[in-house]
């Protein structure tokens, strides 16, 4: 347990360094925005392409694992919405809280950290979780919040969602990597070295960017934020563990990666959606900050637990 905690410290140390740089003003919001762009469009995308190009479609899309993760996410979604309705929250508020509870920081934190801590064999499952979070759950939120506000789903919405997916460099990097893998061709040595060199920048830059992006966040509505943090860091991995090990009988090693991914703090892109639809951006922002801070203690516990799977 102590060994796992010590292994996670450098990752959270980089987040802390970014946070300090942001809070001190040495690293202003504009710099954070450009660093995030570099990670999102270049470094992390290169890493994901390199991972996917060396995998087959069958390795990534494990139907049992996908079913287990989706079932757990659906149960948590319903639970969090139910609690929100008990507080007499509006439908849109209930939806963003539910989305906050199921959407972890798999891209910027999970990919670099879990692959190192759980080994190369975790890559296919991490990519599967990333795909589900970015495409299925994000699409579900947009469709439901549109339905709640307009009373119907606009005929142009599917096209808009499809275009949004195509514009996401992480999704496209994985898709192109799997397409390349499907050809059976080896990635040329020079290209592979280029991808490795660029992808190596993803881990430190992504973690630093997470910390810097937290610098201007404040904690409001602490009770609600605490509940959302509990849902994300405790209920989500617990439900995934039950679903994967008991209901869907997923391979234990794959189940362990699913649980570890579910234990990650709230993703930054949830705030972007909350801000875009003007649906509880302050509480989402606070949930990102609090869940990231608390995850310093909870993530090592979960990783120590799943390594026993």
Image: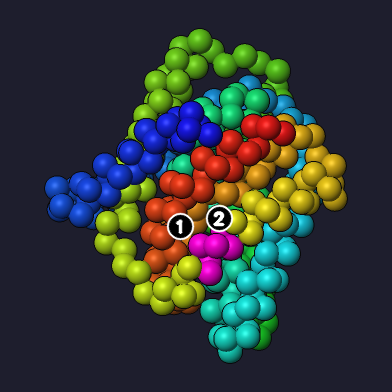
**Residue 286: where, in percent of width, then height?**
39, 66
Q: Label 1 vs label 2: CA separation?
A: 7 Å
Name the element at disc 2. Answer: helix
Q: Residue shown at 76%/51% (left/top)?
A: 242
Badge 1 local density, few (<14 within 10 Å), some, or many (20+)?
many
Residue 229 part of the magenta-drawn span: yes
Q: Give whichever of 57, 302 is nearer the camera.
A: 302
Q: Give whichever of 81, 134 is nearer the camera.
A: 81
Q: Eyeballing the image, is 292 above or below 175?
A: below
Image quarter of residue 90? bottom right
- The circle drawn on residue 115 is none
- The circle drawn on residue 233 is 2
Q: Residue shown at 54%/13% (left/top)?
A: 188
Question: In the current view of this chain or complex, which residue is farthest to the top?
Answer: 189
Name the element at disc 1. Answer: helix
Please state the total of marks drawn on the protein image: 2
Q: Main SS type for the magenta part?
A: helix
Q: Are marks 1 and 2 in contact (CB under 8 Å)?
A: yes
Residue 95 part of the magenta-drawn span: no
Q: Which residues are magenta?
A: 227-232
Reading the image, the residue beneath label 1 is 291
Residue 230 visible to an observer of this rendering: yes
**Residue 298: where, in percent of width, then height?**
51, 48
Badge 2 local density, few (<14 within 10 Å), some, or many (20+)?
many
Q: Give whichever of 93, 264 is nearer the camera.
A: 264
Image quarter of residue 137? bottom right
Q: Residue shown at 46%/75% (left/top)?
A: 223
Residue 136 visible to an observer of this rendering: no
């Amino acid at each position: 347990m102590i060994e796992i905690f010590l292994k996670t410290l450098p990752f959270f140390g980089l987040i802390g360094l970014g946070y300090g740089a942001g809070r001190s003003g040495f690293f202003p919001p504009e710099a954070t925005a450009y660093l995030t762009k570099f990670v999102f469009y270049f470094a992390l995308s290169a890493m994901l392409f390199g991972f996917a190009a060396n995998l087959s479609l069958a390795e990534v899309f494990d139907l049992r694992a996908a079913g287990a993760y989706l079932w757990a996410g659906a149960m948590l979604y319903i639970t969090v919405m139910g609690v929100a309705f008990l507080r007499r929250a509006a439908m849109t508020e209930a939806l963003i809280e539910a989305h906050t509870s199921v959407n972890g920081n798999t891209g910027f934190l999970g990919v670099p950290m879990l692959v190192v801590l759980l080994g190369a064999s975790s890559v296919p499952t991490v990519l599967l979780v990333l795909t589900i979070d970015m495409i299925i759950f994000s699409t579900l939120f947009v469709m439901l919040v549109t339905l709640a506000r307009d009373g119907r789903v606009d005929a142009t919405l599917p096209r808009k969602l499809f275009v949004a997916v195509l514009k996401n460099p992480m999704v496209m990097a994985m898709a192109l990597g799997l397409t390349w893998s499907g050809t059976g061709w080896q990635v040329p040595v020079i290209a592979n070295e280029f991808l490795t060199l660029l992808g190596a920048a993803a881990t430190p830059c992504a973690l630093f960017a997470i910390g810097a992006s937290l610098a201007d966040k404040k904690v409001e509505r602490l009770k609600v934020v605490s509940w959302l943090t509990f849902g994300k860091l405790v209920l989500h991995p617990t439900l995934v563990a039950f679903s994967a090990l008991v209901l869907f009988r997923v391979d234990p090693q794959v189940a362990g990666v699913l649980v570890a991914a579910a234990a990650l703090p709230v993703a930054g892109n949830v705030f972007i959606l909350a801000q875009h639809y003007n649906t509880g951006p302050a509480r989402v922002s606070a949930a990102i900050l609090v869940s990231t801070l608390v995850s310093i203690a909870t993530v090592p516990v979960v990783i120590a637990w799943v390594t026993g799977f």
